[in-house]
Every structure is written in C-alpha cells, then in structure tokens.
Amino acid sequence: VRKILNVRIFDGDKGKRWDLSVKDKNYEILCVSQFTLYKVMKGNKLDFHNAMAADKSQDFYNEFLTLLKSQYQADLIKDGKFGAYMQVNIQNDGPVTIELESPQNKENETGES
C-alpha cells in the first residue's frame, strides 16, 4: 500500500519527470486482483506454485483494499468483483511498466523470516 500510494511516477507541475505520486495528484486507483499472474515459467508451461492459495487470496485482497482505503481517500479506490471474468480497458501512457513487490509479505506467505 505504501509503495502504491507514494511511488513517484507522474510528471510534476513544472514538467519534472518522475516527480509526483498518485497521492500527490489525488488520482483514482483501480485495483484488479490478478493472483493467477504470479507464476514462473518451466519451459513452455506456467507454474503457479508460488501464487497464494485460492482459499486465502480473497481475504488477503479484501484486507489490502481496506488498508488502501484507510491510508488514502476511500472514494478514490475502485475495484472489480473478485474472481470474476472482467474486461478492463486501459491506455498505457509511458515507456515503462513498474512491478511492485513486497518481500516482507512474500516471506511471511512462505513461512520464512
């Protein structure tokens, strides 16, 4: 949540690149659960053994949304229906894709410290 709210990915008012966060700009955040995308490739086959178990993932996602809403403006947090087939139309605007991970949560999920 901290990274999503504070990573500086937007231009500043004077055109400075990578200067402002979603929080600084008061933008909406669209959250779409994509637990099935956490995979590794084994040859030409997808392996999801590192993905969170289905019975835990919905509770985790709901806790994430609650935390995000509590640390930002709840009315600016949008999400779809968990586990539903959705078509999300977006327009990528920029030359980069940013992947945010939280090693602390990853370690806790595997039981390691």
Image (cartoon, rainbow, N blue to C red):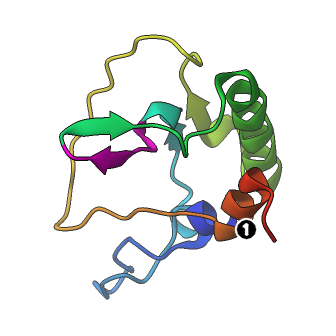
Residue stretch in magenta: 37-43
Q: In the rendered image, which quarter is residue 52 located in?
A: top right
Q: In the rendered image, which quarter is residue 101 located in?
A: bottom right
Element class at badge 1: helix
Residue 82 in the magenta stretch? The answer is no
Q: In the rendered image, which quarter is residue 11 located in?
A: bottom left
Report x, y in % for residue 74.
73, 40
Residue occupying the point 33% across, 86% down: 14
Report x, y in % for residue 89.
26, 28
Q: Is residue 98 above or below residue 52?
A: below
Confirm whether residue 21 shows in the render: yes
Describe residue 74's horizontal placement relative to residue 22 as left or right: right
Report x, y in % for residue 3.
60, 68
* Crowding near the residue tagged with mark 1, few <14, some 14–19, many ≥20 C-alpha atoms within 10 Å: few
Confirm whether residue 1 shows in the render: no
The residue that label 1 is drawn on is 104
| Nearest to the observer: residue 52 or residue 112 | 112
Residue occupying the point 55% across, 16% down: 83
Residue occupying the point 75% across, 31% down: 62
